């Protein structure tokens, strides 16, 4: 099998599988992989999908102990859990692209330090796919992502087109609500006869993440009523 580096930029602090329980000692099954970048570092989605849950995982829901967690359902019906985040960057129902920021590394929930616990569950219901036998209900994230990455798939990126009618189009930091007052700057489509960007993410309805020259990665509100077009 060809090895593909699927966790580039991370240090693996604890792999998937049987290990010594860091709290009580003794053997336990580690249902995910522990990855460390840096405390508060942005965490990007390893695979695209739709957000089923984003927030504090409560006991009894299948997410207890996971702290601030984002659950993303992929096209194969698997649940991807990004756990112990300091904050989440997406909301339930959002469509997330691969590479999109979904939160920031933290130490919420049952942890001994700041890290990302990344877990893949075979099912999304009930309890977001949680079962007592985690060895059966989860998958090795490294193997799963490698098989996914190796599959050839067409690269198609949607474009956001801003018409030339506006000379000041607000853009927002990706970690703030896209509402007036939070803007980090303005784009000037009029000056350039319109502007065009690759869409990196779609954190909520009519809000798109784009890469700009002047402001870096930002969110922009572009409902059809604004005259913006998605192509
Ligand atoms: Zn873990």
Image: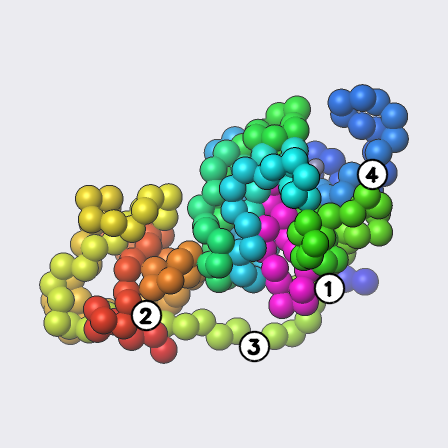
Whether residue 145 is visible here, answered yes or no, is: no
User: Closer to the N terminus: mark 3 or mark 4?
Assistant: 4
Q: Which residues are magenta?
A: 71-83
Numbered label attached to residue 160: 2
* 103 is higher (above) or lower (below) than 72: above
The one nearer the camera, 5 or 202, is 202
Residue at 36 percent across and 72 percent down: it is: 159
User: Closer to the N terminus: mark 1 or mark 4?
Assistant: 4
Counting from the top left corner in percent of width and height, residue 67 is at 58, 34
* Dot 4: element: strand
Residue at 76 percent across and 22 percent down: it is: 23
Mark 2, other Cα within 10 Å: few <14 / some 14–19 / many ≥20: many
* Left-right relation of 187 to 198: left
Q: What main secondary structure does the magenta stretch of the protein show?
A: strand
User: Closer to the N terminus: mark 2 or mark 3?
Assistant: 3
Q: CA distance from mark 1 to mark 2?
A: 31 Å
Q: CA distance from mark 2 to mark 4?
A: 45 Å
Residue at 43 percent across and 60 percent down: it is: 201
Q: CA distance from mark 1 to mark 4?
A: 23 Å
Residue at the spot of label 1: 147
Residue at the spot of label 4: 29
Q: CA distance from mark 1 to mark 3?
A: 16 Å
Q: Nearer the viewer, mark 2 or mark 4?
A: 4
Quadrant position of residue 226: bottom left
């Amino acid at each position: 099998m060809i090895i593909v580096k699927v966790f580039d930029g991370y240090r693996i602090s604890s792999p998937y599988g049987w290990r010594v329980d860091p709290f009580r000692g003794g053997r336990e099954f580690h249902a995910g992989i522990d990855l460390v970048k840096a405390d508060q570092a942005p965490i990007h989605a390893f695979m695209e999908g739709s957000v089923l849950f984003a927030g504090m995982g409560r006991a009894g829901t299948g997410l207890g102990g996971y702290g601030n967690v984002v659950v993303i359902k992929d096209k194969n019906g698997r649940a991807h859990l990004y756990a112990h985040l300091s904050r989440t960057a997406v909301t339930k129902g959002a469509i997330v692209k691969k590479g999109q920021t979904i939160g920031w590394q933290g130490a919420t929930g049952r942890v001994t330090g700041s890290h990302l616990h990344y877990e893949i569950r075979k099912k999304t219901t009930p309890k977001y796919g949680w079962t007592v036998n985690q060895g059966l209900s989860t998958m090795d994230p490294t193997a799963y992502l490698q098989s996914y990455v190796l599959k050839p798939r067409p690269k198609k990126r949607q474009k956001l087109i801003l018409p030339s009618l506006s000379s000041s189009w607000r853009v927002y930091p990706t970690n703030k609500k896209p509402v007036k007052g939070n803007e980090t700057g303005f784009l000037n489509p009029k000056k350039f006869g319109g502007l065009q960007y690759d869409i990196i993410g779609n954190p909520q309805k009519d809000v798109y993440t784009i890469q700009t020259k002047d402001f870096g990665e930002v969110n922009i509100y572009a409902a059809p009523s604004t005259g913006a077009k998605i192509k």
